[in-house]
Amino acid sequence: MILAFLNLTWPTFANGLALGGVYALMAVGIGLVFGVLRLVNFAYGQLIMGGAFALAYGSQWGFANWASILFCFGVVLGLSVLMDWLVFRPLRTHSPAVMLVATFAVAFLLQSIALLAFGPLGKSAGQLAILNAPWDIGGVFIKKIAVIAFATAVGCLAILQLLLTRTPLGLHMRAAAMDFRTARLLGVRANWVISGAVIVSGLFAAVSAVMLSVTELTVTPSFGTQDTILVLAGVVLGGLNRPIPATLGGFAIGFASGILGGVLPSNQSQYLPSFLFAAVIVVLLVRPNGLFARGGGAVERV
Amino acid sequence: MSLVRRVPEFLAPALLILATALLGLAVSNYLQAYFLDTLIKVAIVVALYVFIGNSGVLSFGHMSFVAVGAWTAGVLTTPEEQKRLIMPGLAHFLVTTNVGNAASLALAALVGGFFALVVGLPLMRLSGLAAGIATFGVLEITNNVLTYEQRIGPGLNTFSSVPATTGIWQAAIGGLICVAVAYGYQRTRFSRMLRAGREDPAAAAAAGISIYRQRLLAFALSGGLAGFAGGLYVHLQPLGASGLSLDLTFITLAMLVVGGSGSLLGAVVGALALNGLFSFFSAATNTVDVFGWSLTVPSGTAELSLGALMAIVLILRPNGLTGGRELSLPRRRAAADLSEKARVTT
């Protein structure tokens, strides 16, 4: 396995960065909602699946590229707002476990709707496939999508950082993530903050859907599920409570997954999920509060 | 609580299982398959309950114990000449070793329990989301290894030649064994200590309870039951690694939560209700008669209605259909019922 790293090439490295970037976006999307709602949204992958199907239909109906992407954004945002209204809102006051299982139910529901409507074989989202063509950068051929995905991820995260630090909504969101009750007592409007988090999280899901559907051309009802599980692991690995550690955790697992997938010989790369999750478990045993969390995590005294 | 009033606590889930089995005997062979499947689900959900219900910690890893149990029972009962055909890469000593039906189930329980114990040793130190993700990791790793490792099983294929010994009686007895073990456990002081830790970790620790040790015990026990259920399952139908993965994890967890994760009755009711509904719509894909109506639904309706029902029950009754309570005869004053209130925290 160590020797395998000698196979590391620039294109593999770039793919790792790109996957890391997309996973970082997903991690932020999950982390933002967790911050304000204390809800681990397992159905996040199904949002991405919905967006990817929108893209697939966009290319089937001959939409222009921008129209397909817009359609994808519309579908994902609609789904996430609907999810918030129908499921998260009634369950807001319940225990995290009930909410988590409720998101399973939503994930299962959306997946079966997709299965019923689009069939198990999936559809091809071929429209943006030209982005898989390489760019010649100083003699190294790097897929266009890798560059675009990484740049988009960095851009999105920068905008989010500005939103969080420079706008009233961002301030309110950070306050709510720290302590929701106190924030409300101080006049932060709960619904506003939650809707803000849900919408930003939905936007990031849409961006991820566009990026992921370029590399994984066939969109099936289980599209994005495996990615979401990895991202969840990454988010917990980084530390769920604050956005930057969560982002780093998501990036780390995406990067590791991209690199290992590229350099391992095929008889070992089939065990890639095992390697990743074994690493996650080991890290969690050593640092249960997350790799990048500060301090030991206060234990409540009574 | 007096002994008499306690009787329904065990009897209610047991009778539900028996009733399901008897109903399964009354219907056609074709429909009986659904009842068998439901009884296996009951066994799996009861296994989940032993850990999740008592400890209040969610585990996503139990399907790996079911899978390990299924692998154990499957490999040890497939006829030798079939093994050479279906599992060409199987380790030699596994090819030549064969045991009977009952022994294979016992071994499945043993291997499942041992695996859970080994996994639990480090993992039970974790709590909260870290524990959830770590058990998820166990599921992913187990599933990944079982899918590709051909020395211990069929790899990407399924166990297609395991003797189908799980009939309605074996399934019912298996379910009853699970319920009996779960009930027996929850009457012990170990379970009470674990529940104390669930309600208030600090107070329990102050009373000298090692939550880690109690969790580990419950985890190993429930892993053993899960392995046993896996053994029953592989004797029912050809199983592969892909069938024992995420989907089944979610469905069984949802059954537990929908039924009410705080009680044994909840586990059984949840499994019966959700799997009953699922089976009904699956059967209706090929037309069923409902009191003279002939009903046909498009395929996929089963999944859809299951998801919708799960969401609706969680919204309307977040503590589950049973509210996490056992069935007991009414007390003179029904005041102190709050003590058994279900509360699962991640």
Image: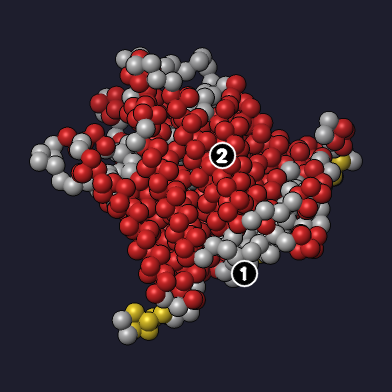
- Badge 1: few (under 14), some or many (20 or more) residues near its Cα, within 10 Å? some
Position of the N terminus of chain A, as image quadrant, is top right
Which residue is identified by label 2?
A: B113
Position of residue B127 measured from the top left corner of the image (x, y, whole percent): 47, 28
Relative depth, front residue between B47 and B184: B184
- Of all residues, the one furthest to the right in this rendering is A139
> What residue is at 46 percent from the left and 44 percent from the top?
B48
Which residue is identified by label 1?
A: A60
Q: CA distance from mark 1 to mark 2?
A: 51 Å
> What residue is at 48 percent from the left and 24 percent from the top?
B213
> What residue is at 81 percent from the left and 53 percent from the top?
B89
Q: Amino acid at mark 2?
A: Gly
Left or right, A174 with reference to B61: left
Are both tags, 1 and 2, on one chain?
Answer: no
Position of residue B180 measured from the top left corner of the image (x, y, whole percent): 40, 46
Relative depth, front residue between A55 and B111: B111
Relative depth, front residue between A166 and B129: B129
Q: Amino acid at mark 1?
A: Gln
Left or right, B273 with reference to A3: left
Which quadrant holds residue B210? top left
Position of the C terminus of chain A, as image quadrant, is top left
Instruction: Mark yes or no: residue B47 visible.
Output: yes
Q: Chain of mark 2?
A: B
Position of residue B333 measured from the top left corner of the image (x, y, whole percent): 10, 39
Q: Chain of mark 1?
A: A
